[in-house]
Image (cartoon, grey):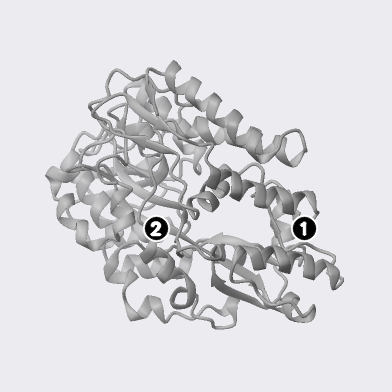
Amino acid sequence: MLKTRWAGRRARSVAVALGAAAALAACGGGSGGGGSSAASCTNTIKVEDVPLVTVWAWYPAMEQVVDHFNETNDDVQVCWTNAGQGGDAYQAFSTALEAGSGAPDVMMIEAEFLGQYTIRNALVDLAPYGAAELEGDYTEGAWADVTEGDAVYAIPVDGGPMGLLVRQDIFDEHGVAVPTTWEEFADAAQALQDAGFDGVIANFPPNWWAFVQAMAAQKGWAPFTYDSASTDIGININTPEAVEVLAFWEDLVDRGLVATDEAFTADYNASLVDGTYASYVAAAWGPGYLEGLSDADEDAVWRAVPLPQWEGEEPRSVNIGGSTFAVSEQASDEELAARVAMDIFGTDEAWRIGIEEAALFPLWRPVLESDYFAELEYPFFDGQQIQKDVFLEAAAGYEGFTTPPFLTYVYDQGTQQLTALVEGRVDAAGALEALEADVRAYAESQGFTVIE
């Protein structure tokens, strides 16, 4: 896994298309040696006349984390900008990379998208700056997701081990047991409707290929193999395991037992909290997402339970999301930028902010394995210790997942196929067959050799 996880600097001949957008004005990027003006920072600089390291990040409560770092470091200061979330930030970053200037020194990048930047030599190997010595501070899966061989291309921050968040009051009212397997999940979906529930057990989001990817990974699906020592790539999307998982959800869609709302829209958010969905298949950041919705039903009784497993199969943990801090090739002081990437979430105090104010799931072992985190009670869940009950075990079981250095394209094409599926224009097998053919053709057009 460590060897094949991310595309690296040796695959220089491969051209990968990355999205571009207009560069953000006055972000002050690419000047870690102090060239950035404090006037361009969102935060207030605490110590004057010391080098500034520019950081783009969209974490909630990030300004508080930055303030903590700046208050406890008198020889360097973080100049923070929220350059947009996810795709918007990546587009701005890609534009700056193409232009040769304007990128931040330190960039927040979701782990699964790192390969799109390492392949273009856009990220600094942090191993020479001491990052390799931090391996023991992170979980096996988290470290696998940011390394390749001896190279360390980012520092893990938060993760997305998965569980099931349920409206216990809805299950109890209708006399239906909370499922522990996917087979029970399908039975519970039917039982809720038979008992008169006017909602659905959950949502199947056609615009979120990452959801299907995680569900299939729980069956052992490993669609990509890649070693950046060459331009060979293995693509095996249309497997029996993937077809079985997607057909499972297709059946629930066809029977009207799940909704097919696009994720992260206003309607979706409303359905999460108004009793339309009896459960939410969620990553560890899901509880914070739920709690942040302003129209949440105060009378709802939420509980977190482990992600359902497949009957007769070895339990498997999966992950959605999780972010890192990487150092841009444009950082003028790589060593100082690497220090910020390693240290900004490297204290108990910073993580208390991240956990209590931003609902992040830490991948840093000193906090991840602490009694404080395990025993933290969540008022939204009536005091349940959801980390101890669900997410800590899920995180410990995650071993990493290989993604290609053109994941954006896979996600876009996957969304098209899922949309066709929920509209009845294609079945599960047809969707996966078409997706594999499309991705194979794209990989070859980008200079890769697709191997069996």
Q: Residue at x 26, y 25 (%)?
A: 230
Res 286 seen here: yes
Q: Sequence order check: which comes first, mark 1 or mark 2?
A: 2
Q: Name the amino acid type tagged 1.
A: Leu
Res 259 seen here: no
Find residue 344 and report its horizontal and vertical position in percent: 29, 56
Is residue 73 rendered to the left or right of residue 409? Answer: left
Q: Residue at x 52, y 40 (%)?
A: 239
Q: Quadrant of residue 368?
A: bottom left
Q: Which residue is mark 2?
A: 158
Vertical placement of residue 103 versus 169, above or below:
above
Q: Residue at x 59, y 67 (%)?
A: 181
Find residue 155 and report its horizontal and vertical position in percent: 28, 50
Residue in the foreground of this view, choosing between 269 and 400: 400
Residue in the foreground of this view, choosing between 230 and 300: 230
Q: Quadrant of the C terminus?
A: top left
Distance between mark 1 and mark 2 Cα atoms: 33 Å
Find residue 306 and report its horizontal and vertical position in percent: 53, 70
Q: Which residue is mark 1?
A: 257
Find residue 384 and report its horizontal and vertical position in percent: 53, 81
